[in-house]
């Protein structure tokens, strides 16, 4: 497990080629997500699919907020939508978001997971099924245990896992829960996660 | 990973076996959700492999009925998305009032929450007495629950807020009798309701309906099956009939896009062109 990533220097670890990045966050997630996505420049070519726990409002402003703050295209996911590389998708409030084998997105209203719908576990586990080892999972700040099983699944299938350093997270329950289930490839502060995403894209595309 | 690939094969075989033996067709359901449902069922049946589950359900119809409870998703609430019901009341009901009699089809009615919501709204608008509601689902246990109209008091309290936001005109508590932890809904609400077993995947059309409500059912289907359902709805609706969907379901990406026009797009209310 590495605890820093600067993107330069002789000690640069070898990164795998991934086809998608999935991200999960809860309490404190908006600021954390903005921090890791800000370094992504226009023309970024990997798809990013994110679950951020929010109250069950029918209409979320999440995609709008991020679109006006980021250089990459952002949208709320639609059911049966085909994943387009370079786009950041947010799960819609009130629905679980899954990735299907044919790389489309699908919605469901199964039971809540750790009181959450959308659930990070459901997104991550379905993403691991769809992308196998060619997937990176990123788990950030949060005050519940959602996402830990999903991260373990990504790792089990040979994907890359990145957990925010709990000591620096606004709420450490979520990263701590993930660390209790598996040892991630990286345990990083937010700025390093941003640099890592840029590097993952450079290698993959 | 070898183990996982086995699971993919077993899942397809199970779905095929269910279709061949019981005519329940999950072959065109969205895969990720079905996979989770089956994994959940495996844990409840305390079985190690999907093959073992397949053997069980092939040879024991009661085990299949048990499995069906896991495969269908009975998550529902009354007046879910209140703005949707408010829009029906404001934009659709005035047109429905011009018909001497009405047929409404609630497709995938699950345990009945949508049915009672619709019936309450129709009663308040003076339409219930001249309406026949067909409430259909693939799950006989859900239909049985829907027929009984008994819901947990805890949930019903939460529905009260939805009811008010949906433009409810009376006290929600006038529609049920509280009995311990349960709310027993007024049985006259379902006097004109016909509950029936019907599958959007395998069965055919209902005739000449004025409004079809199918909410949070189509998300579980792949595009091909969604289009089959839209075809059924199109053929079942009368001239200028209404189709209402769940808040994240849309005709936009289907082959039937041009056969309907949005009436209240945001609330997923469409009208046959």
Image (tube, helix red, strand yellow):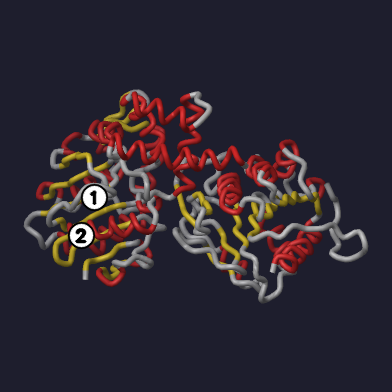
Q: Quadrant location of residue B60?
A: top left
Q: Position of residue A166 (x, y in %)?
A: 78, 46
Residue A28 as seen in the image, left or right of residue B142: right
Q: Residues within 10 Å of mark 2 (few under 14, many from 20)?
A: some
* Residue occupying the point 48% across, 50% down: A94
Disc 1: host chain: B
Disc 2: host chain: B
Of residue B114 and residue B252, the one placed in the foreground of this image is B252
Residue B232, placed above or below residue B256? above
Q: Position of residue A106 (x, y in %)?
A: 47, 54
Residue A113 as seen in the image, left or right of residue B141: right
Disc 1 and disc 2 in contact, CB within 8 angstroms: yes
Q: Position of residue B12 (x, y in %)?
A: 43, 42
Which residue lies most toward the left here? B100
Residue B77, placed above or below residue A194? above
Q: Which residue is mark 1?
A: B121
* Residue occupying the point 49% across, 40% down: B36
Q: Quadrant location of residue B188?
A: top left
Which residue lies most toward the bottom here? A42
Residue A189 in view (yes/no): yes
Residue B99 as seen in the image, left or right of residue B157: left
Q: Identify the image quadrant of the C terminus of chain A.
A: bottom right
Residue A35 in view (yes/no): no
Q: CA distance from mark 1 to mark 2?
A: 9 Å
Q: Earlier in the sequence, mark 1 or mark 2?
A: 2
Q: Which residue is mark 2?
A: B93
């Amino acid at each position: 497990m590495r605890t820093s990533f600067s993107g330069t220097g002789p000690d640069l670890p070898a990164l795998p080629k991934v086809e998608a990045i999935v991200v999960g966050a809860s309490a404190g997630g908006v600021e954390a997500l903005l921090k890791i996505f800000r370094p992504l420049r226009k023309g970024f070519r990997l798809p990013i699919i994110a679950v951020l726990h929010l109250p069950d409002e029918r209409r979320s402003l999440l995609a709008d907020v991020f679109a006006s703050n980021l250089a990459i295209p952002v949208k709320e996911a639609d059911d049966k939508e085909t994943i387009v590389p370079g786009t950041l998708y947010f799960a819609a409030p009130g629905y679980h978001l899954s990735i299907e084998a044919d790389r489309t997105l699908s919605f469901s209203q199964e039971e809540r997971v750790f009181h959450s719908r959308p659930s990070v576990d459901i997104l991550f586990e379905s993403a691991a099924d769809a992308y196998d080892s060619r997937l990176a999972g990123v788990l950030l700040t949060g005050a519940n245990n959602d996402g830990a099983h999903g991260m373990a699944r990504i790792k089990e299938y040979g994907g890359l896992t990145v957990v925010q350093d709990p000591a620096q997270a606004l709420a450490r329950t979520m990263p701590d829960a993930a660390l209790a289930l598996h040892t991630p490839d990286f345990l990083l502060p937010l700025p390093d996660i941003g640099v890592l995403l840029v590097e993952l894209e450079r290698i993959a595309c | 990973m070898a183990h996982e690939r086995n699971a993919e094969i077993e899942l397809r075989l199970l779905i095929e076996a269910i279709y061949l033996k019981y005519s329940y067709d999950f072959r065109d359901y969205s895969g990720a959700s079905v996979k989770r449902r089956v994994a959940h069922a495996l844990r409840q049946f305390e079985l190690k492999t999907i093959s073992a589950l397949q053997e069980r359900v092939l040879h024991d119809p009661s085990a299949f009925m048990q499995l069906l409870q896991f495969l269908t998703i009975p998550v529902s609430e009354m007046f879910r998305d209140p703005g949707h019901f408010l829009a029906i009341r404001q934009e659709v009901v005035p047109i429905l009032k011009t018909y001497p009699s009405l047929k409404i089809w609630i497709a995938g009615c699950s345990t009945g929450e949508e049915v009672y919501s619709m019936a309450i709204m129709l009663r308040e608008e003076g339409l219930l007495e001249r309406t026949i509601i067909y409430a259909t689902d693939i799950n006989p246990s859900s239909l049985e629950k829907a027929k009984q109209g008994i819901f947990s008091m805890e949930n019903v309290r939460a529905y009260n807020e939805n009811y008010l936001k949906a433009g409810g005109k009376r006290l929600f508590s006038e529609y049920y009798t509280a009995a311990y932890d349960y709310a027993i809904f007024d049985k006259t609400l379902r006097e004109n309701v016909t509950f029936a077993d019907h599958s959007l995947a395998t069965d055919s059309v209902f005739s000449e309906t004025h409004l079809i409500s199918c909410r949070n059912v189509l998300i579980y289907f792949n595009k091909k099956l969604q289009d089959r359902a839209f075809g059924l709805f199109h053929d079942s609706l009368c001239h200028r009939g209404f189709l209402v969907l769940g808040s994240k379901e849309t005709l936009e990406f289907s082959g039937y896009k041009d056969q309907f026009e949005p009436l209240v797009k945001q609330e997923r209310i469409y009208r046959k062109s």
